[in-house]
Image: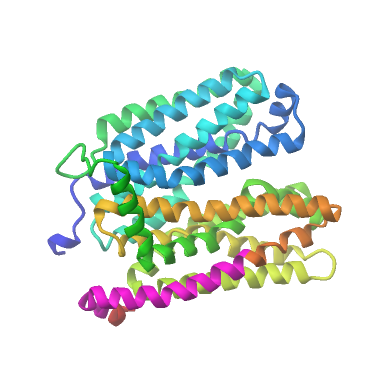
Amino acid sequence: MSVQEQNHRGAYLVWLVGLAAYLVAVFHRSSLAVAGLVASERFDISAAQLSTFVMLQLLVYAGMQIPVGLAVDRFGPRAVMLAGAVVLTLSQAAFAFSESYATALAARFFVGMGDAMTFVCLLRLVNAWFSPGKVPQITLLTGPIGQLGAIIAAVPMTWALSQLGWTKAYLLAAGFGLVITVAVLAFVRDEPKARSVRGAALSWTNIRTSLGASWEHPGTRLGFWMHFVTQFSSTVLGLLWGYPFFVRGEHTSETFAGTLLTLMVVAVMIAGPVLGRLIGNYPWHRSTIVLTIVSAIVVVWTAVLAWPGDAPGWLLVVMVIVVGVGGPASMIGFDLVRTSNPIDRLSTATGIVNQAGFLASLITVIAVGVILDLTGQNFKAAMSFQYVLWALGLLQVWRYRVKTRARMVRDDPGRWARYTRIG
């Protein structure tokens, strides 16, 4: 193995600590999922008001991506990750003591903000500590493992809410943030040769230059649309509408609906490392892999929605597995960012891309709810809204893959000649 192919010493320790921070952030993001009924009673709110928590967190998370990316390029991933851990800890503690809907919303706003300050930092650390050949595999492994935070949140929070009550349960959750803060302080370094790095000052001129240069490169735009078109279907199912769609739209049992959502998570976990190795071996065909996966998602959804009456159970199983693959497939967009931008604006470009899938998810969550209200709970009509975003996303991926390939061949013909030979 050449020096260029070797990871830096301590790379896995830095990654594992950063991964733990991301897992805890997802835990905090998902900690309300099992507390819906308790929250409705505590704050005396309707189902629509309860869903506002989810939409607010998505909106804040997406809206914070570019500011966070700029901050990471300026102050380094360690400082921003620490800030995120502190914000998450304090906001969860505030949520624990919230007794009104307004204060609870404010607390969840800051949960979304702290959550947004973690993932971009982790990707920057991966790029700094691992060899270029290893980065795609670690990146596509990072997302699925981090999503385990949503699963881990379910059982402990259910137990804590029933045994300890609202305030103590969320204070206990906030305590995880303290542990992560100490771990990041002790073990995370921005780069192998420096505990902390600093970029250019955040003047308006530098911000415009960084954003403009990042967005100008077609590789960043291709990554944006990859993330946009692959992620939203699985996110919408897992975050809000999957359970109601299966139980009320397809008339499955509640147990089977839960099993379907669990299978989707399993598909995410398995697909991540497989896709990581695939794009590492065939970098020239990253957009082809995305186009193939999204086309498969569209096909299985079409089969379910077009099926006369309720779709059979086996078809729903196939659907959640295929849709689940779209989650880690969205991470391929970050690999386009890596090969299209210099390190000094990598996090800014990553932030641009990372907002795409969450914007698509937010649009879909809202649209499905509106269509359900307008059609008297017609889930097939509501879920058909996804075709609008699939059509837009696929068109843009195809458009920018042509431009990205042309730019990359022009900028570094030797490198991309090697890529086309292996892929």
The way the protein has been coloured in the rendering is rainbow
Q: In this view, does 356 lie above or below 28?
A: below
Q: Where is residue 223 in the image (x, y as percent from the top left)?
A: 42, 63
User: Residue 380 versus residue 356: which sits nearer the camera?
Assistant: 356
Q: In this view, does 329 lie to the left or right of 129?
A: right
Q: Which residue is drawn at 39% across and 42% down?
A: 68
- Residue 212 visible in image: yes
Q: Position of residue 298 (x, y in %)?
A: 63, 70
- Residue 137 visible in image: no
Q: In this view, does 207 lie to the left or right of 254?
A: left
Q: Is residue 216 left or right of residue 102?
A: left
- Labels in figure, total: 0
Q: In this view, does 96 lie above or below 189?
A: above
- Quadrant where the N terminus is found in the figure: bottom left
- Please report the bounds of the magenta region as a residue range: 389-418
> Residue 391, located in which quarter of the rendered image?
bottom right
Q: Which residue is drawn at 39% across and 75% down?
A: 403
User: Residue 341 versus residue 14: which sits nearer the camera?
Assistant: 341
Please tell me whether the stretch drawn in magenta is mainly helix, strand or loop: helix
Q: Which residue is drawn at 26% across and 34% down?
A: 187
